[in-house]
Amino acid sequence: MKVWVAHLAVLAVLGVLLAVLPAYHATNLARILTLAVFATGYNLAFGYTGLLSLGHALFFAAGVYGAALPVTYWGLSPLPAIGLGCLAGGGLAALVGLLALRTAGVSFMIVTLMFAQAGYLTLLYFGQITGGDEGLVMPDATALIPGLSPDTARAVIAFTLFAVALLLSLAVIRSRLGRVMVAMRENEERSRMLGYNPFTVKLSALVLSGLFAGAAGAGYALLFGYAGASFATIQYSILPMLWVLMGGAGTTLGPLLGTAAMFYLVDGAARITTATLLVVGVALVLLILFAPKGILGTIRERGARWIP
Amino acid sequence: MKKELLVPSRRSVLKGMGAGIVASAFPGYTWAQSSASIKLGFQLHRTGIGAAYGRWYERTAQAALKVVNDAGGINGRPVEILFEDDATDPKRGAEVVEKLANDGCDLIFGPLFSHVVIGSAPRAGELKIPYLVCSEGYHVASGMLNRWTLQPGITDVRSQVSSMAPWVAANLGKKVTMVYPDYAFGYDHRDFFTEAIKAQGGEVIAQIAIPPTETTFTRYLPQIPAETEVLYHVMVGPAVLTFVKELGDFYGSGARPQIFGFIDSLEAVDTASPGLEFLEGTYFWEAMNRVKQDGQSEAETAYRAAVGVDDNGASVTDAADVSTYSHMFSVWETLHTIKAGMEAAGYQSTADRQKFVEALEAMTTMAEGPGNPQGDKVFNGKTHQVFGHQNISQVTGGKMMRVHRTSIEDGQYPDAVDYTTMSF
């Protein structure tokens, strides 16, 4: 109970922040929340199930285009399009999972990376439809929720997406499936001996993760007006991993914390130095050296054991 | 004691990191502001694939800024430019637009890469901040963007490509084989040149698209039909060096078709580099001649000196640092157009942004001179796109010497959009 209350309280704080922050930071927060959905999904696979995927850009991009193409070519309205993007991400994750989960460890990383790269090249190949490397401009954000200003609509949608993602992820990890996911991460052989099928558990985790990534991609494209093949590049497979590592893998709120920290780290560093990636790199090295469990993971280790 | 110094405790490092993150969260608010100055945001490709361009775009912007300020600024007010790196990434690009707008910039200008422009323009339109791109993409005039996005400093690729066709057909040949990168930039070349050469009675007999991941081209070269009279190539990135070398190996010292390329392949690259000998005698499109030509205008002489480029097109301080001369003038010309537009609109504050856009839309011609050293221009207020002269150069003794300068009309095409009918 305490855990649910804590999470609802975090959501309440986020809602208040969206309402009271200056416009610039409120929009940044909307970006962070949308990307945190991606990170939260990644965390289900990586943080809780131990699946280190390097192909999540594919699921994110599936969401981007799953929403962008129907909106562009069939004039679908944005909200159902987000649903389609979510399904596209989950569907593709199921497909990739069926094949990639025959491998594990480093092989799994490589196979997922290859799938994502193939996805990226496919987007370029069908450039006439997808806009390829240049991309597509999404309709005016005033269409997001008729009657609401773009900024308000963006805040509402980003908040809703994140709230659903956070509560869903909490529900999953506290469920029977969630406990088995953790068991797989900790000791796959022992879990198998106890009668659990690693393949189905891992596939479920990957599909859930893909649904989250798809929803985030769809949301990002529609809220911020752009869909392009760059969302399928390796960068977007690495980023969610970094966000999760920074915030704390295997903690429900870590992905949000990591996404926000990384966003402002890059944003602040860009004004001081051209070597923004170096700053990010140093931050990560320090993290691995002194707080290998990430921000929230370390706090949990140091006493706040109740953090899920 | 020593150990403590070298190995800080986890707690102290976390504390420090936390403080760093919090401090870095509000950089915009620590930036000194002067109420009297006009603030221009510059979306800069300082890192990422556009960095070679970005370096020169920044230098050009600084040089233009100095000239404008020395001449009294804009409307008598000093001008400052706030540069922000977009990492040549469309997602970061949109964030940078947001950040510069939040920092109180009167407008934003400067991006080159198409995907950054397309990723950022929607947000600029929503924030109702003028967004002046130096991108040469056809995305502005195609109608893809919005009323707040304009391209007054450089002719777009459709116009550049189309204007080459008459001279190529008349002087090099009519049977053309095109080699281009297999993505949007390449498709603009493929589509518009194919159409333009047809209008000149020529034809494109083969189109060879090279996937962006390719690092060697030997398997594509045999696809060039033997009857090819002109080989039209446009490659970007470091692969161009390999491409030229392999092309040289392919033809050897035997007969070869005429070769015509776009300088985009070799911006920031010295044409006298080892391995590029095969380019001798071939032709290039240049928006502005990198190498000083006979009869260089006074305006260009002043421009060349101001941006610190020598007679060969390299930095005056480092002969190996070759400029992006055929693109960077757009930053100079855009800044001067900003000055002209703001003064025409009586621009006082961000409340006058719409008036500024309307003033630009009302512009029709820009005379060659200190503000437009590349040449005179025609601005189309409806499509938000400028049109100018283009040059064709031949590599002679390792240097690109002009053999033809197009008319502005050579590059004009029917309007695809009328932005002035769109709401602000």
Image: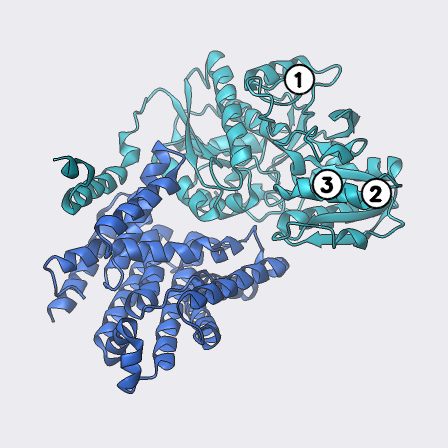
Chain colours: A blue, B cyan
Q: From the top left corner, tell me how far across and down residue B267 is, in percent.
A: 63, 33
**What secondary structure is marked by label 1?**
loop
Label whose residue precedes the other's in the sequence (3 or 2): 2
* 3 and 1 marks on the same chain: yes
In front: A140, or B420?
Answer: A140
User: At 63% from the left edge and 32% from the top edge, which residue is drawn?
Assistant: B269
Tell me the kind of residue under disc 1.
Asp
C-alpha distance separating marks 3 and 2: 15 Å
Query: Badge 1: few (under 14), some or many (20 or more) residues near its Cα, within 10 Å?
Result: some
Tell me whether the residue at label 3 lies in contact with that at label 1, contact meaning CB atoms closer than 8 angstroms.
no
Residue annotated with mark 3:
B244
Q: Horizontal placement of B131 versus A265: left or right? A: right
What residue is shown with label 2? B230
Position of B402 relative to A76 (above/below): above
Dot 3 alpha-carbon crowd within 10 angstroms: few under 14, some 14 to 19, many 20 or more: some
Q: Which residue is mark 1?
A: B311
Q: Residue at x 53, y 60 (%)?
A: A117
Return the disc, 2 or 1, that comes first in the chain's sequence.
2
Q: Which residue occupies 52% across, 40% down?
A: B149
